[in-house]
Image: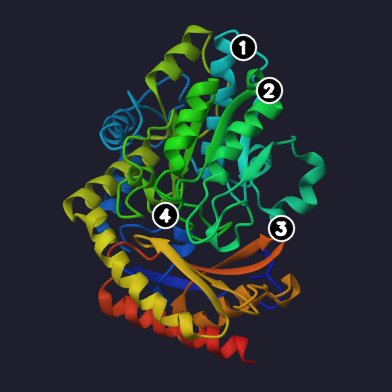
Amino acid sequence: MPGVFYRQRPGWTFPRAVRGEGAFVWDETGRRLIDAAGGAIVVGIGHGVREVADAIGDQARQLAYVHGTELTSEPVEQLAAALATRVPVDDARLYLVAGGSEATETAIKLARQYHVARGERGRHKVIARWPSFHGSSIGALAVSGRPSLRADFDPMLPVTPFIPAPYPYRCRLPGCGARCSLECAEALDAKIREEGPDTVAAFIAEPVIGASAGAVVPPPEYYGLVRETCDRHGVLFIADEVMTGMGRTGRWFGLEHWPGVRPDILTTGKGLTSGYVPGGAVMAGGRIVETVNAGGGFHHGFTYSHHPVVAAAGLAVMRYLERHDLVARAAVMGEHLMVRLRGLADLPAVGDVRGIGLMAAVEIVRDPASREPYPASARMAQKIQAEALKRGAIVYASGGQVNGAGDLIMLGPPLVIEREQVDEAVQILGDAIAAVTRA
């Protein structure tokens, strides 16, 4: 459609989607597509859930909008209470926003203002990991180790200290091999000392690395060391659960796979509203919020924060997840997905298969022995994505994790997906990889 400013993709035509139900989407020609990626790892409860649509409509008819600096609303208060019972954050308080990038902006500014309120104005740096992704706004992109997305905007981005992410398939840190040496976790302490502890406000990390590296799961000891390091230096730990939250990994939140580790601030989005409306959330510990409020309040806001309709959608999604036990289901179905994906390992271009729950990735390489990626110009992930779509499955293409090169195909289907639908989607993906990489 000429009037629409699409995200440009050379050679890509946009089929017009007209309907969704469960794990399926139909286009205007009547073609059925398995949504094996939940869009961009967004759709959790499935497409076409009437009760969520009804909750959104009912709330919009009753009260569509009030500004969060003046009035509150019942759905926002109910969502805060519901999330507080689920998130691994002590005395959690909700700051509701309209997406993941807004959640990151809110979290890093909250961390900064917390230290200001305590009289430590020198703490302004946020340490992040490479690779990583925390959003596309300027502040969120500044703490994202995603070269392909940063390149054009580098002169505009605040300088961020980075440390290596735990990425076993491509790790080159000392001692790393079949077992993680945990140099990646030790690097946080070294970086804080290098920057000066009195200059560091926070450390931000995705519990399971998302699209920037493809469903990478850190080792069991990793986040315990991170938490100890942050505590030792008075640095806040921000857990970015925009992709991993709301049941995606087989737990309500990804960090729960590391028992006892609790962040100071947690962000989520995507699955919070399951794509029915744009939504995101920051869950901050009570001591953080009370300190900031005592210092004069949070000097930050968005027009659409604390939105009643977003909150109503989030509540309806949570209730649906609970009633249908979809978080536990994601763990069980995720095991089946991983078994099927590992069956693709014999394809010459498949370098690695990894993931947890219904969040998985296949890393595509030109040479499995050397792990050499295809050049970025080949756009292999995008070609595989297009081929899979042609064959009837929606997958999520990403990459750039190897100095701007590298290809990843992610799968993150709705948590309601059935075994036979998983089987069909993986078969299509395997056929697409074979077709594209032998061409």
Q: Amino acid at mark 4?
A: Gly
- The residues bearing labels 4 and 3 have C-alpha atoms spaced at a distance of 25 Å
| Residue at mark 1 | 120
Q: Is residue 300 above or below residue 102?
A: above
Judge left or right: residue 75 versus residue 360. Answer: left
Measure the C-alpha gap from mark 2 to mark 4. 41 Å
Measured as percent of width and height from the top left, residue 71 is found at 40, 21
Report the residue at 41% width, 71% height from top. Answer: 36
Q: Nearer the viewer, residue 321 or 353?
A: 353
Under circle 1, the secondary element is loop
Q: CA distance from mark 2 to mark 3?
A: 29 Å
Counting from the top left corner in percent of width and height, residue 190 is at 63, 33
Query: Which residue position is annotated with label 4?
Result: 275
Mark linked to residue 52: none
The answer to whether the residues at label 4 and label 1 have Cβ atoms under 8 Å apart is no
Q: Badges 1 and 2: C-beta atoms under 8 Å apart?
A: no
Q: Are marks 4 and 3 in contact (CB under 8 Å)?
A: no
Which numbered disc flags the more N-terminal residue, 2 or 3? 3
Q: Is residue 190 above or below residue 52?
A: above
Which comes sooner in the sequence, label 2 or label 4? 2
Task: Count up the numbered dots.
Answer: 4
**CA gap, disc 1 to disc 3?**
35 Å
| Residue located beneath label 2 in the image | 196
What is the quadrant of residue 343 in the picture? bottom left
- The residue carrying mark 3 is 148
4 or 1: tag closer to the N-terminus? 1
Amino acid, disc 1: Glu
Q: Quadrant of the N terminus?
A: bottom right
Residue ID at (70%, 27%): 195
Which numbered disc, 2 or 3, marks the residue closer to the eye?
A: 2
